[in-house]
Amino acid sequence: MFDIKVIEVQGAERGDVQFHFLQTDFWASFKGMHGWKPSRYSLEVTDTTNKTQSFRLTISLMIRRFARVFSIAYVPLGPELPESVKETIPYNSETYLSLLEDIGSALKQYLPKDCFCLRMDPPIGFSELDAKAYHAVLIKKSTLNKSPTDIQPPDTVLFNLTRSEEDQLAAMKPKWRYNVKLAEKKGVEVSANGPEAIDDFYKIFEETASRDGIAVHAKSYYKDLLSLKPVPSDAHIKTTLYIARHEGDVLAGIITLFTDTEAVYLYGASSNNKRNLMPAYLLQWTAIKDAKAFGSKVYDFYGIPPTDDEHHPMYGLYRFKTGFGGEVVHRAGSIDMPLKKGVYGCYITAEKLRAFWFKKVKKIFIHKK
């Protein structure tokens, strides 16, 4: 359906495309420091059924090698379509899925010979009803599979930053507004920091991982993220480590990334100490106010359970993030184009086992303590 010409380029050409932070050169540079090989491609796309429609896409693509034997290719939250094309090719349409197939086919010659899969996280958002229709179409695609595990969180909360501060506070649940004021009244202090405060953050991050059964990177991963300077094409990007303290005690911390379009809450940690002072609420409210001042249009809480099921092991996270009054958004999650089916089958089996360990088994052991 689409004729695609691929050219490797240096640097993003934004045009009328609003890149998600995962598609920026800044993020590609950061991931390049931690096991991924990033590259960027310009795609000249022509609709063969409507040759008057042609447009250009640029995508950030990353390659990760395993044991020097095989590799996986990954397009994080892309490709983004130009605004001028979104009406004719909606993200949640069969046409867009056909475009993903044709992009995958066009990119094959640029991937390593040992690459067993091209994985994409398309920026498709929909309601639960739309999701059923979308997955029904995806099943019919012979070259695309729904990945059994998602790289990026498919469900999230988006908080509108274009409103006044009064309207933002009014959107919160009353208890959330109360907790923000309580933390301030009790003397919790929030500071904005860079990599110099990483030791304080990582100590309580390890405490959080032990308590909640989550996986964490090495300390250097988060320090590099905070230390990396934006490249010229992404000059309007800022990473910050917010730390909440009370009488010298480190109570909680979050790492955020701001761009001119979005602010993202990437990582969070909290101590078991003085949780009654509600430092997490003041941390988020401080970051929200700073993001608005920076010029971001939306604050992405970046990851919640798919529903408000009280029996879900992460229900507390759902309740905390939705309580600020943002819009719950469901995305498509990861989509795979298998290139070597034997290796691909082994890989996704390993992924499923890893996910089962962290999401089920490990949490059972923690809850029994």
Image (spheres, rainbow, N blue to C red):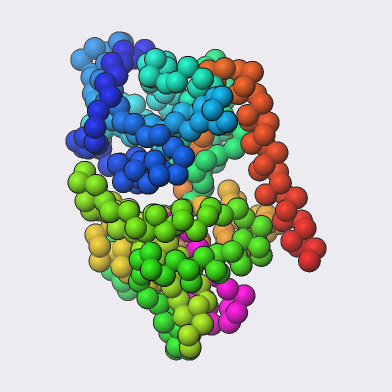
Location of residue 319 in the rendering, given as x and y in whole percent from the top left corner: 57, 63
Task: Tell me the quarter of the image containing the C terminus.
Answer: bottom right
Task: Tell me the quarter of the image containing the N terminus.
Answer: top left
- Viewer-side residue, 32 vs 148: 32
- Viewer-side residue, 346 vs 318: 346
Residue 57 part of the magenta segment: no
Q: Is residue 348 visible?
A: yes
Residue 277 part of the magenta segment: yes
Q: Is residue 45 visible?
A: no
Whether residue 236 sits left or right of residue 291 in the image: it is: left
> Does residue 119 sit above or below 102 in this rendering?
below
Q: Residue at x 29, y 19 (%)?
A: 6
Whether residue 225 sits left or right of residue 249 in the image: it is: left
> Does residue 258 sit above or below 141 in this rendering?
below
Q: Residue at x 31, y 16 (%)?
A: 4
Location of residue 143 in the rendering, given as x and y in whole percent from the top left corner: 52, 17
Q: Residue at x 73, y 53 (%)?
A: 362
Location of residue 254 in the rendering, given as x and y in whole percent from the top left corner: 45, 65
Residue furthest to the right in view is: 368
Quadrant of residue 197 within the rendered picture: bottom left
- Viewer-side residue, 215 vs 330: 215
Q: Residue at x 44, y 66 (%)?
A: 198
Location of residue 14 in the rendering, given as x and y in whole percent from the top left corner: 22, 37
Quadrant of residue 208 within the rendered picture: bottom right
Q: Which residues are magenta?
A: 264-281
